[in-house]
Image (tube, rainbow, N blue to C red):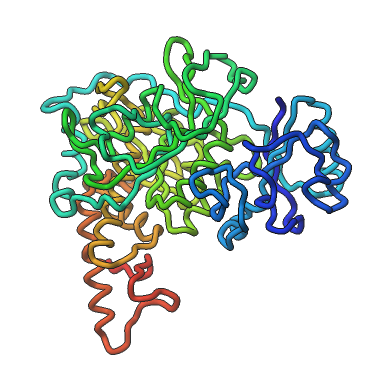
């Protein structure tokens, strides 16, 4: 099936834009004139499916991402999500004609083919680093996680959404920790166009509520954030909850598992996690972009407008080439260090890199109630997501809402530099959870002292319960 994600010109706006259309997952082969009276659509032929690729925030059935939309919110419109449609069908000529018709009328501003691609691949192993003590302990010690958790153990009402290969439902480390999720993976043999032509395994075809992991990567990431700590270190976000969004299927490539998916499935999950109350979204995945608008840019903008912190891996390519969503503005992008504090050879870097964190010899949960070591920037990003969750937990405990941009700055500005000169491979330095949390507490104290002054100095537009980056003091 040929499928394309299309961005329409802004003035094409049936009742509430693309959210007036049926969701693509529920769509059937229709004529466009059946869903819109606009004459620009009337020439599209039978055999073409048209629908919206994203779940609506306001919908008839809250638990069903494919449910019909009730309207489009102001944030959905501001992020131009109401202009996103999907066109496809089994007849490639009919699909091509439909796109040609819309393009000839100047109705399309952007078009992307929907194809499965590799979003996760383990790096080539660095020379072995000596790991001593309890498995996994070095990483928590390197970022002062125990000190941070001693000050703020986390809040179960604060939710970190893990967008990955899923989370192992039966693993003992996640009992009572996962507060919801969804499986957005929709792949088929015809979608798998990677030159290596690996073999897809596991659940790949149907969206449903089964977010179980069949690759192991997502469980490992989730354990770093939220494990109970039964046979591994406790998750760095302590008592905070997890949300499981399965966005990547698994393929076997040259004997190894890789995570494969489509940008559209990831976008749908970012949208759904945001609408269902995630406070932090962890994206331990990435893909280069050849041209056009950066992948995921609109949906990340939507999440940030809803005050959701987004964290992504910098990539395992070891170069300064941008990887998305990590290179999207506003995302906290994380590289990896080894147990000796060195930036790993595989860690992606460049102007989009914000910070580094432990990403070598990371011990966490695996499939079949097991555990294993993994390497990669994918396994560094969860420590930063956990830090963001603890900062939000602290704010909630003290009746303060931090803006997502403030949280990003708190994490960056309190990184450990150890007197090293600026290094583009390190970003702002190495994550220090305790310092970031302490700075957040100091910011709250300063803000409250300012409130008690005769003329409160907070900037116009920020109320007493909100703290923006402009309130920060050196």
Task: Name the residue at the top extreme.
Answer: 255
Residue 233: image location, x then y, percent: 18, 34
Q: How many marks?
A: 0
Horizontal relation, residue 277 to residue 176: left or right: right
Residue toward you, 458 or 29: 29
Percent x, y for residue 305?
A: 49, 59
**Does any portion of residue 424 appear in the rendered image?**
no
Q: Residue 169 or 125: which is nearer the viewer?
A: 169
Which quadrant: the N terminus?
A: top right
Residue placed at 21% from the left, 31% from the top? Answer: 340
> Residue most toward the bottom?
454
Residue in the picture at 41% in, 52% down: 277
Q: Quadrant of the C terminus?
A: bottom left
Question: Would you place residue 399 above or below residue 265 in this image?
Answer: below
Q: What is the x, y in percent for residue 52?
A: 66, 44
Q: Residue at x 54, y 34 (%)?
A: 288
- Pick out the residue farthest to the left: 133
In the image: residue 29, left or right of residue 367: right
Which quarter of the figure has residue 452?
bottom left
Q: Quadrant of residue 179?
A: top left
Residue 352: in sight, yes or no? yes
Q: Is residue 75 left or right of residue 418?
A: right
54 relative to 442, above or below: above
């Amino acid at each position: 099936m040929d499928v394309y994600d299309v961005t329409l010109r802004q003035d094409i706006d049936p009742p509430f834009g693309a959210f007036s259309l049926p969701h693509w997952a529920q769509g059937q082969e229709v004529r466009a004139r059946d869903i819109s009276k606009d004459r620009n659509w009337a020439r599209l032929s039978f055999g073409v499916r048209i629908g919206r690729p994203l779940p609506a925030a306001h919908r008839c059935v809250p638990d069903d991402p494919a449910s019909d939309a009730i309207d489009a919110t102001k944030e959905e419109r501001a992020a131009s999500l109401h202009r996103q449609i999907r066109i496809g069908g089994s007849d490639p000529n009919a699909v091509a004609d439909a796109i040609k018709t819309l393009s000839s009328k100047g109705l399309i501003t952007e078009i992307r083919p929907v194809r499965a691609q590799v979003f996760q691949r383990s790096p080539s192993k660095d020379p072995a680093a000596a790991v001593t003590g309890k498995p996994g302990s070095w990483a928590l010690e390197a970022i002062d996680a125990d000190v941070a958790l001693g000050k703020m153990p986390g809040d179960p009402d604060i939710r970190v959404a893990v967008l990955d290969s899923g989370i192992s439902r039966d693993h003992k480390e996640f009992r009572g920790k996962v507060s919801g999720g969804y499986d957005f993976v929709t792949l088929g043999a015809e979608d798998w166009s990677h030159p290596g032509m690996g073999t897809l395994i596991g659940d790949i075809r149907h969206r449903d509520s089964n977010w179980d992991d069949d690759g192991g990567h997502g469980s490992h990431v989730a354990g770093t954030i939220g494990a109970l700590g039964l046979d591994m270190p406790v998750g760095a976000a302590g008592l905070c909850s997890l949300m499981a969004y399965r966005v990547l299927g698994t393929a076997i490539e040259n004997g190894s598992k890789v995570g494969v998916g489509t940008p559209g499935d990831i976008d749908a999950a970012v949208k759904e996690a945001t609408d269902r109350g995630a406070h932090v979204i962890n994206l331990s995945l990435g893909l280069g972009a050849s041209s056009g608008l950066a992948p995921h840019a609109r949906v990340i903008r939507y999440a940030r407008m809803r005050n959701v912190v987004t964290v992504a891996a910098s990539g395992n390519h070891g170069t300064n080439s941008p990887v998305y969503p990590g290179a999207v503005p506003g995302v906290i992008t994380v590289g990896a260090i080894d147990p000796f504090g060195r930036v790993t050879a595989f860690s992606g870097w460049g102007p989009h890199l914000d910070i580094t964190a432990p990403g070598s010899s990371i011990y966490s949960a695996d499939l079949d109630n097991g555990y294993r070591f993994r390497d990669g920037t994918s396994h560094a990003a969860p420590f930063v997501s956990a830090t963001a969750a603890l900062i939000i937990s602290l704010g909630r405990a003290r009746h303060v809402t931090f803006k997502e941009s403030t949280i990003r700055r708190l994490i960056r500005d309190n990184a450990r530099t150890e007197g090293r000169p600026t290094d583009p491979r390190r970003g702002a330095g190495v994550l220090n959870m305790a310092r970031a949390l302490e700075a957040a507490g100091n910011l709250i104290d300063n803000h409250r002292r300012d409130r008690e002054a005769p003329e409160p100095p907070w900037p116009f537009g920020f109320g007493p319960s909100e703290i923006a980056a402009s309130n920060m003091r050196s």
